[in-house]
Image (cartoon, grey):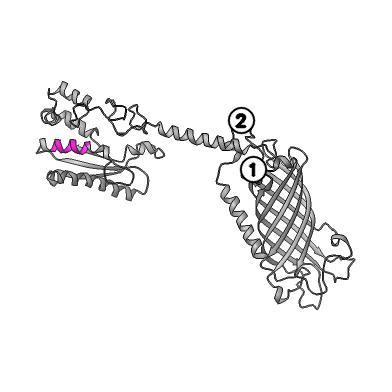
Amino acid sequence: MKHRLLLLSFALLAITAGYSQKKDDAKEANDTGLAKDYNKWTLEFTAGQSKGTRPFTDGYYSSNPDQLFGSIRANSFSLGVRYMFSARFGLKADVSSDYLTNNKSTASKDFKLQQYRFGLQGVVNASRLFNIQQELGRLSILIHAGLQASRATPKLEEPGDPTSYYNKSELNLGAMFGISPELRISKKFSIIGDFSTLTNFRQHFTWDGHVSDQKNNLSGQMVMASLGITYSFGKDNIHGDWAVIDEGKLKQVEELDKRIGELETMMNDSDKDGVPDYLDVENNSISGVAVDTKGRMVDVNKNGVPDELEKYMTDNYVDKSNVRETIETANADMVKRLINEGYVTTYFDSNKTTPTNVSTEGIDFMLTFLRNNPSASINIIGHADEIGKSTYNDKLSIGRANTVKNTLIKAGINPDRLHVVSEGEDSSVAIDSGDARRLVRRVTFRVRE
């Protein structure tokens, strides 16, 4: 029994703890007639009877077998606070006092034992869990289970009895499970009943204050029944246990929010060329250069240089259509400016040292420049975004620059003309923007003087 109760307690605590990470039902509602806000905090006070069922020393017991339910006395008082993460799941913490004595109308020997308890339990609103809240109306049913710690102190002195532990306390640990029917009487108040059972896994005392028999040692059980009142407090006047929440509509709202979020992400335009990222196959196009419907810089003659950039160079420097001839005869200062100001760039995916498929044009441009300027040498500058440790990003930057260097070497460029430089992390863009971080995972170039 105690093993099943412990498993149930842990399971309920795990369920409520996991559910607390999700959005509250109230936050996911919109203006569709749903309850958007409701009081999630509830204060509970109950009074009733608690009875130890085992272990007892021979000759001691608390019930009166001649009366229905063994007589009823108020000897248990509890004060608790509950927080509902959602309309179904929550957590409850409570403190209580139990004063156990024998029934004077029976032949039991006298005993007195004071117990103070603290409990932490998961709570499930069973009415909502099984979707019967409308049928129950003002009635609600809560199920709670969890762990409890208690201190038991015998309060009856029995001189000469070596098994009596008068005024000596023992700390116990156990699990408890209960069901609490609740009846709403106003927007914030309700009457609550509770039926619970408690199992201790560390109990040396009997409930009458003596040392337990060896066969019952480290094992104790108690049952409790109580009645009380709850008060729901917060900024709203709607009690969370009865707030009207349409689960079907909430799900529709959640799905709609998700779709809107996906659309917003799809409509991002990282390179500001007017083509959304989800259609853009070249999301690193040069600002101001014309692109087609796929975001590719327009290059009608397929010579590797965007037409607008080629036209600018041709109009201002030479009158040739071939890109290699253009670079060979163009003004040296203009070409250096394009390179040194970062217009010639190679981009990389996150944590990668291999260029993206659409960004190798920068390497081709530099290869043409170096071939046409055999006395020139360049710095190959590696960059990284701010995600990860700085030492790792420095290494990643060097790896990216070395990849470009090795590509140029394999294309016939003398290694002495290529110098690798690591700039490490680029903090010029917002670290929480994935689109912005794409722009700084790159290799740029600088012509050495």
Q: Residue at x 56, y 41 (%)?
A: 23
Seen from the viewer's position, the closer of residues 309 and 111 is 309
Q: Residue at x 71, y 59 (%)?
A: 117
Q: Say which mark, if any, is on residue 435.
A: none
Q: Relative to residue 67, is residue 385 depicted above or below?
A: above
How crowded pointer 1 is (Cα within 10 Å; few <14, some 14-19, many 20+) is rated as: many
Identify the magenta region.
361-370
Q: Residue 220 in the image: x percent, y percent?
A: 71, 67
Q: Which residue is mark 1?
A: 87
Kind of residue at badge 2: Thr
Q: Residue 423 in the image: x percent, y percent?
A: 27, 43
Which residue is most to the left?
374
Q: Relative to residue 143, is residue 430 depicted above or below?
A: above
Q: Main secondary structure of the magenta part?
A: helix
Which corner quadrant of the image does residue 215 belong to?
bottom right
Kind of residue at badge 1: Ala
Quadrant in which the N terminus is drawn: bottom right
- Visible in this render: residue 449? no
Which corner quadrant of the image does residue 301 belong to?
top left
Is 285 inside the magenta-drawn segment? no
Label 2, secondary structure: give it: loop
Q: Which residue is mark 2?
A: 32
Quadrant in which the C terminus is drawn: top left
**Between discs 2 and 1, the one toward the N terminus:** 2
Left or right of 258 on screen, residue 152: right
